Amino acid sequence: MTRCAVFGTGSWGTAFAMILADAGCEVTLWGRRKELVDAINETHRNPDYLPHADLSDRVTATTDPAAALAGAEFAVLAVPSQTLRENLAGWAPLMDPGTVLVSLMKGIELGTAKRMSEVIQEVAGVGPERVAVVSGPNLAGEIANRQPAASVVACLDEAVAKRLQKACHTPYFRPYTNTDVVGCELGGAVKNVIGLAVGMADGMGLGDNTKATLMTRGLAEITRLGEALGADPYTFAGLAGMGDLVATCSSPLSRNHTFGTNLGRGMSLAETIAATKQTAEGVKSCESVLDLARRNGVDMPIVEAVVDVVHNGRPTQEALAALMARSAKPERR
Ligand SMILES: NC(=O)c1ccc[n+]([C@@H]2O[C@H](COP(=O)([O-])OP(=O)(O)OC[C@H]3O[C@@H](n4cnc5c(N)ncnc54)[C@H](O)[C@@H]3O)[C@@H](O)[C@H]2O)c1
Ligand SMILES: O=P(O)(O)OC[C@H](O)CO
């Protein structure tokens, strides 16, 4: 039986552990808090993050990273992106040389502008053939109800992607393989920022034309950045690109979308942060995405507008007006 360690007992770590177990794997979830770990072991539920998900008894939890990793073929990482480097430095020395590291995270590191797979390779000292990424329209709250969804499992080594695909394929979760790790990661990280922008427009009471415009021009920004970084532009037409953008920008379950909606309704940044109980990666990653874009000479005006609102206190109305006032240009350049 395939053994998996999942680091992070938040909503996606828990839902993905459920998927792996439903696909027949034996899963150990690592969590920081003993009370939550005990609750998962006793009730087969995660009362804090995903109370309606029934976990199979193939899922157990521990606070001991070495116990989680014992015999693990896959080490799945589902902590907030900005905490990965520090956490992984403690976990990597405990891993077997053959363990594949799998990122579920959708963020870009602040300061370095690195993708999560780059941080993993650097901290764990492993090559790209041992790092995989899972990204797609996968709102954990829906997956918890075992509603049908698909996703992309990406690894430079296609054989590894296929092994992971098999490990997480269930009747309700359909993973596709891809070797474009860069594109899949950028799709996941940047859609969060566009989700913030669409949420702001929703909160301001604007309609579907505005929403469609932000999503489509947002996808143009994602694709421009991706092409500059060597991604396959077709990836952005797939589940990890357009698919995830649609889910995030449409759903009240999306934390990024909800964060933007609260700002658009006029809540202050401090009030919005206080109202957000889970990780909304775009709030921090909008700055690192803009940093990455600038390092590569890529124009990302929507991302820039989101940074202005979220970090520089610019009113949403003003940021939107500035976007509309940009010089006229061809749709494709
Ligand atoms: N929730 C979803 O629907 C979903 C879907 C796909 C991808 N993701 C991505 O998965 C990643 C994890 O998100 P999530 O939804 O599980 O977040 P979450 O907020 O639900 O859970 C985060 C988990 O990390 C833990 N954590 C927080 N700070 C930590 C630290 N310093 N060290 C160790 N652990 C820490 C929390 O205790 C919690 O268990 C994010 O990058 C997110 O973008 C989420
Ligand atoms: O809740 P969000 O905004 O982090 O989005 C969750 C997933 O990334 C959707 O695929």
Image: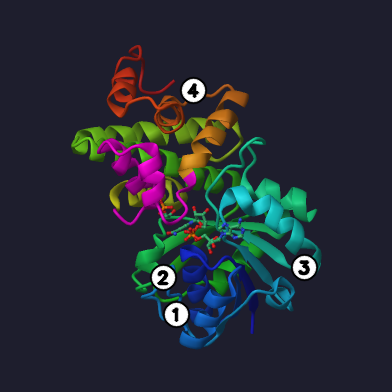
The mark lying in front, picked from 3 and 2, is: 2
Circle 4 SS class: loop
Does label 4 or label 2 sit earlier along the sequence? 2
Q: Which residues are magenta?
A: 252-281
Query: Label 2 near label 1: C-beta < 8 Å?
Result: yes
Q: Answer few, some or many: residues within 10 Å of disc 4's Cα (few below 14, many 20 plus, some between 14 and 19).
A: some
Q: Main secondary structure of the magenta part?
A: helix
The mark lying in front, picked from 3 and 1, is: 1
**Residue 14 sits above or below residue 205 on the image:** below
* Residue 214, picture quadrant: top left
* Residue 111, picture quadrant: top right
Q: Residue at x 20, y 38 (%)?
A: 208
The mark lying in front, picked from 4 and 2, is: 2
Q: Which mark is residue 45?
A: 1
Disc 4 within 8 angstroms of ligand 2 (CB): no
The x and y percentages for residue 224 are: 49, 30
The x and y percentages for residue 56 are: 48, 85
Q: Amino acid at mark 1?
A: Arg
State the residue in front, 311 or 281: 311
What residue did someone put label 3 on? Answer: 95
